[in-house]
Image (spheres, rainbow, N blue to C red):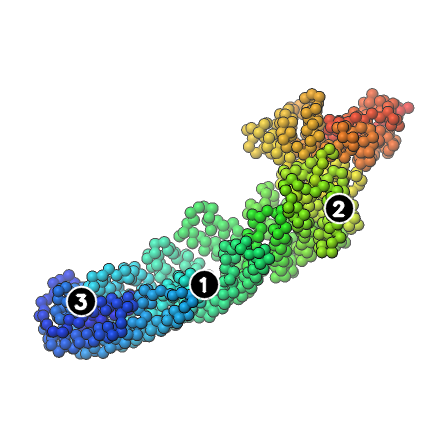
Amino acid sequence: MFSNFKLKGALLLSAAALLLAGCDARVGETPPPADAYEFSGTQCLSSASPVVKDFIKGTAKNPDVNALWDCVGSAVAQFKKYVRGNNADRYTSQEIATFLESNFFDKSKKTKISPELQVEFMKIKQLLVGGGREYITRAELDKAASTFEVFRQVTLGLNPYMKVLALNWTVTHVSNIQTDMAYFEEANTAVQKAGRTLATLFEENGQTYALSDFVSLMKEFSKFFEEDWEFTRTLETYMPAVKKVKKALAGGDENVVAPNEWRRFALLGSRGYIQYLRYYYFIKGTEETGAGYRLAYVSRTVEDILSVFEDLTAQKPEGIVSRDEVADLLSTLSKIWPDFKISQGLVVEGMKVKKLLFGGSSESFSTNDFQNARLKVSRLKSLVERFMPFWAIYGADWDPTMYTPEEAQKFFLDAQFILESTGRELGVLIEGSYDLKDVINLAKEFEALYPPKKADDSLVKTAQKYLPTVIDVKKVILGGDSTLNKGHWSIVLSYGARVYTDFLYYKYFLKDVTWDKPEPVGNLSVMVNQTLNILKDLMQVKDGNQFTRKDLSVIGKDILTLDILPKGIDQTALDQVVKVVVNNVLVEPKKRIAGSVPNALNADSIEVLRKELQVYLDAELFIAKLSQDWKPNEGITPDDFVDLITKASKSKNNSAALNEALKEFALMANTSSPLIVDSEGRLIISNRVSVSYTKKSLKQLNLDRAIARIAIRSFATDMDRITDYSGVTLKEVQYGFNELKVIFIQMGLLDKTNTTFGDSRFRDANLFTPHADGNNYASFQEFTDLVGMIWSGLNINTDLKNELQSDCLTNEKDPVDGTLLKVECARKSYKRSMATYMKGTPEYLKYIKKASDADEFDDYLTNVFKAAGYVPNSKKTVKWGDLSLAPHVVQYIEMLFARYDKNKDGYINTQEALKAYGMFKGLLLEFAKDQIDSGSISENDLPAIFCFMLHYGKPPETLKEKLVFLLKWKGKPEKWDVWADRGALAQVLGYVADQTAKVATPEIPGIDKEIEQ
């Protein structure tokens, strides 16, 4: 802007012929008297003011400008011809002022040239024609006449473009933008030509000029014209910055333009002002000019500015702009704009970024730095042009609903490709390295000047929290220390672009969507594959093309500090999980069974993960297509679902992943007690209620199926058992449990003293699930059932525990597993709340209502509690954690009734018990092994013992019980009288729990041979 103010003032001065001022009047003192010289026909300067004003506004006509300079020339000639001062060959400023006031200004207005203005005139006079500031000689008047001719040509050259220069021009409609741009470039040429002309004139006179004097001149001019010029106030505000820029780029004294600095200063002023005008007309006015033209002018502006800096720096004696000069300039700007704050530390950190972008030193800017930056502008422009059509996408301000789903996906895919390639090419343009640790220093310096409004918005805290993870990831992938070298940037920016567009894909296509429609499920599949591709491609960048367990441990350690994972998990547990994932879960079963132990995440791992996720997602898509028009409670019967799967499996359009899922769905649906949940995710267990697979049930079944599938494929040691779905052995379950036990403990899901969790769940799967068969394997179907029943039990337990805390632990905000409460209170709370939260077991709710007395149901719940882990004690208290499995036990009992209470009377009779015996035979053989080996009992006695237990709630133990067993049960099936209700089954489970609390494996008491004899 400075050039504009300088030019306007010079024009005003020249046009008014006030360059003829002489003696240095003392400001504030009364000037010496002067004679008045009057001429006729010399009042032409009275009309100078309107012409000058029109010129400044850009509305003056060339004939008027010419006439103005003719008047100026006439004034000089007449003054020289007719006026003699006190000294024969020179004039004082007051003599000239009196002459002008009397002969060239409107006498009716009594215009006066103030002593202050005379002082400033003489400084300009010295600049233009040389000599001293005390007088103007007749020889200097002759020289002034030729100088005015220079100004005539300058003003006539600028006149057609003064609207542009005076900010009075407007860009026309975008259809005419090319014409406007051409006109603007003509103005650019004219301004630079004028600057060079004036610089040559000033340089020839060999004079210096103080920039602060120009501010004073403009102030006095505004007073003289009785105008309140805004640009004068603006000039005064910005002049400190102009001085700093002048010193930094033109050199020398910041307040003084020396003779040898005029060319550089004119270059800085004229070209600098043109860049401001470019911004004002073509960049600031984006809507008027269009984004494409705006980009072109941003590019052109940046190129020109860098070119100016390059040229001026080259002409400086030092050849550089030092960091201290940059800091000095920015400090001045902070005084002009209070909101702009700067510190030495921020400049230091900023110069590191400069070195990264431009190269060179962090101590200074050199001509090479500006040249490098300038040469990159056109490449940057082409890169920006490529992604401008997708700017709304990158700015998170795009609305995909404005397109069809197919069009939106294609458009976004194009945007992804462009941003990735742009990032890769942009990385090539970066000149140097950068230490990521400096990000914290940069954030600290910035935040010290611009503190966040909220503590949570702190850049420093964010950097301190996440940067260690970023640095460790960098080390793992690219090696080295915390520094990103030049060769790293293309990798970082291209993969950064891919990660960012993955986030954008989630934002546009997955966030806040309902997952019951095919489209979002398909979109999720797209994103999953994109993310896996990023991870797989990153491996190709890393040495060894894999992430070792050590690498993952380093990253895991950082993740623990981010509070992303549940509290309580430590490095040991996380490392163990990583071990299981990379050596079991993500290894193709054949290779794992053959002995492959990769101890790393590699390309094969990614493909295993991709396959398993695809099976899950293709099944989700199948469910979404099937149920997209269903009402919330609408569904499909199990039989119809089996028929549908059978038909769908024959389609040639299916993916291999979908066919696997359909096969597994068929296995799961083949039961009289399918896994069907209510709206709250709680299993519906009943052989009296007609149920259908709702949308929620199918989605839960798919999740259960996926977990069981992965678990079996991760730990089974026989490929045949994987392919035929016969499942895992107890030993394999125990191994898997032991491998993951530490994480379950630290997540609060398991007590550290529990060593039988794996064994117990294996038995649960074999005894209490819809597909349970009691053999030595937990089949795929049984495992899936178990997962579903556990999910349901967890949901119910959460609700029951909330009520329990309210009823029995009013003073405990966060009870832990060891927190004690009264058993009686727990029973009352559960009896009340189960009616609400266990509606999926309607026969159980009927049993609660029909229980003959309170004691009967209390006994039932006590046995359930014991089966869940409660150990009776004299204080009649129960641990909070021991009640967690109570709803699971209730579900197990209900599942037995759903499967074996064929006449639906609420009892397991003798025939029904014998059908159930086959499932429990294996467990009984295990418990009675020692007795059978010793001959106390035989395997043939087990059905009788099983029925005896259902009748009495336990096996025969006392002498009387053993006699009864021998006389009425052993070998006498016709006398067996089994009539077991839910209380009886709970009593059996309670008995087993009591025995388990005494010994590791409960034993079935032997029958003494004495009694038998």
Discs 1/2, front: 2
CB under 8 Å between discs 2 and 3: no
- Residue 260 place in picture, x, y as percent: 30, 74
Q: Secondary structure at mark 1?
A: helix
- Residue 659 place in picture, x, y as percent: 73, 52
Q: Secondary structure at mark 2?
A: helix
Question: Which residue sits furthest right?
Answer: 1013
Q: Residues within 10 Å of mark 3 (few under 14, many from 20)?
A: many
**What distance separates the C-alpha of mark 2 from that of mark 3?**
106 Å
Q: Report the amino acid beneath label 3.
A: Gln
**What distance separates the C-alpha of mark 1 from that of mark 2?**
59 Å
Q: Quadrant of residue 286?
A: bottom left
Q: Residue at x 58, y 51 (%)?
A: 510
- The residue at which mark 2 appears reads as 643
Q: In what quadrant of the picture does the N terminus appear?
A: bottom left
- Residue 658 place in picture, x, y as percent: 71, 52
Discs 3/1, front: 1
N-terminal of the pair, mark 1 or mark 2, is 1
> 781 or 124: nearer the eye?
781
Q: Residue at x 53, y 57 (%)?
A: 482
- Residue 666 place in picture, x, y as percent: 75, 46
Residue 9 visible within the image: no
Q: Report the amino acid beneath label 2.
A: Asp
As drawn, is 982 to the left or to the right of 210? Answer: right
- The residue at which mark 3 appears reads as 118
As drawn, is 277 to the left or to the right of 985? Answer: left
- The residue at which mark 1 appears reads as 291
Residue 585 visible within the image: yes
> 62 or 603: nearer the eye?
62
As drawn, is 563 to the left or to the right of 84? Answer: right
Q: Secondary structure at mark 3?
A: helix
